[in-house]
Image (cartoon, coloured by chain):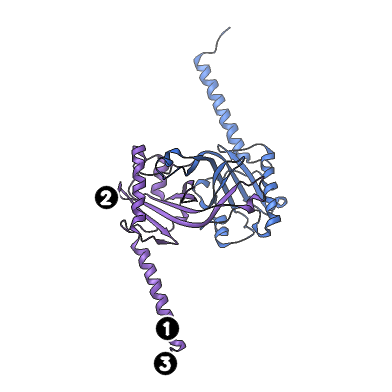
Chain colours: A blue, B purple
Amino acid sequence: MKTLGAPALVLASLIFGVSALGATQRAADRGSPIYGVKLPSGYRDWKLISVAQENGKNDDIRAILGNEVAVRAFRQGIRPFPDGSVIVRLAWRYQSSPRNDAVFPGPQSFVAGPPTNVQVSVKDSKRYATTGGWGYGQFEAGLPNPDPAVVQSCFACHRKLATLEKDADFVFTAYSQ
Amino acid sequence: MKTLGAPALVLASLIFGVSALGATQRAADRGSPIYGVKLPSGYRDWKLISVAQENGKNDDIRAILGNEVAVRAFRQGIRPFPDGSVIVRLAWRYQSSPRNDAVFPGPQSFVAGPPTNVQVSVKDSKRYATTGGWGYGQFEAGLPNPDPAVVQSCFACHRKLATLEKDADFVFTAYSQ
C-alpha cells in the first residue's frame, strides 16, 4: 500500500486547516442561535458600565461594558434603552490571588482568572419584539455557543426582573459612577 | 443692634459659595500630596484592564482602567511601562444584591455599591525616580485625599511586589482578555 508523501500531507493539512478556519468563520458569522447576535467588533475597547461578582455555578467576576448608545442611556437614565444599545458582559473565573495576598495585610485579594464567556444583549425592539426587545448571545473563545437552550435561558431570567421592576427594561446592571 | 438684611445675606452666601468652590478647585488643581497627581480628565471613559475584589478593610469591588499608553503596554506586554502610562483603579463598596438574588437561582450576586475612592498611578520615570517611576494619588468624590500618609502607603505596598516579581514594574494588575 502506498503511503501519503510529505507534499500530500502538507496539502491535506492546508485543506483541513483552511476548511476548519472557514467553519469557524461561518459559525462566528451566523451568531447566536435564535437571535443571530454576533460578537460586536471592538467591544473590548468599550466603556465600563459596572462590575459584579457571582458565586454559585457561575463563580466569576465580571465587567459590563456598553457601546455609545447604551452608555449614554445608562448615564442619562434613559429607559427603555434605545434601539442600537448593546451591552456586553465579560466574565472571568473568580480567583483568590496568593501573589497579591503575599503583599497585602491578609488573605483578601480576588482577581480575574481565565475568561469564561462573554454575553451580549442587543436592543432591537422590532426584531426582538417577543423577548422584550432584546436579543441575546453567549460567546466562548470568540464563538457563539450553539446550544439554543443557553440563549433561551437569558430571557427566561431577565424577564423575571420585570416582576420586580417595571422600569429596568430587563437589564440587571446599574451604572456605577 | 441692626440685623443683616436679605440682600446682605444673599451676597454673603454668594461670596462664601464662590470661595468654597474656589477652594475645591484649588485642591483639585494641586493634586495629591507629595506626587501632585491629578484625577485625569475623562478617565471614566478609558478602556478596561481588569477587575478585582478585595475583602478585609477595603471590602470593595474594583475596575482598573488605563489610558492609551498604559493599555497598549498591557496588551503588548511592554515592561517597564512607558512614561505617560496612567492606570486608574475605581472601587465601590462590595455589596450583596438581594434584588438580583430574588431572580437568580440562589444568594449569589454581588454588585458595586457606592463609590469608595479612585486611585491613580502615573508613570514618569524622571519625576518619580525615587518611587520606581510611579506617582500616586487617591481621590474621594473627585478630590485628592490630602493626607500624605495615604499616598505614602501606595508605594510602600507596591514596592513589595518587586521582591516577588522583578518584571511587574510595581503593578499588581494583569490584563484580562
**Kind of element beneath mark 3:** loop
* Amino acid found under the numbered disc labelled 3: Lys
* Amino acid found under the numbered disc labelled 1: Leu
Identify the image quadrant of residue B81: top left
Q: What is the distance, in whole Å, between disc 1 and disc 3 at their CAs?
A: 17 Å
Q: Position of residue B22 (x, y in %)?
A: 37, 71
Return the chain for callout 2.
B
Position above or below: B59 against B140: above
Nearer the N terminus, badge 1 or badge 2? 1
**Kind of element beneath mark 1:** helix
**Of the residues tagged 3 and 2, which is closer to the observer?**
3
Q: Is residue A144 left or right of residue B26?
A: right
At x 33%, y 53%, the residue is: B152
Residue position for label 3? B2
Q: Can I make out residue B156 in this image? A: yes
Q: Position of residue B119 (x, y in %)?
A: 41, 54
Nearer the N terminus, badge 3 or badge 2? 3
Position above or below: A110 against A8: below
Tell me if mark 3 has few (under 14), some (14-19) or many (20+) residues whose alpha carbon lies within 10 angstroms of its own. Answer: few
Q: What is the distance, in whole Å, between disc 3 and disc 2 at their CAs?
A: 61 Å
Q: Nearer the viewer, residue A61 or B126?
A: A61
Residue position for label 1? B11
Q: Position of residue B101 (x, y in %)?
A: 64, 49
Q: Nearer the viewer, residue A26 or B80?
A: B80
Residue position for label 2? B126
At x 50%, y 17%, the residue is: A7
Q: Is label 1 in contact with label 2 (beta carbons under 8 Å)? A: no
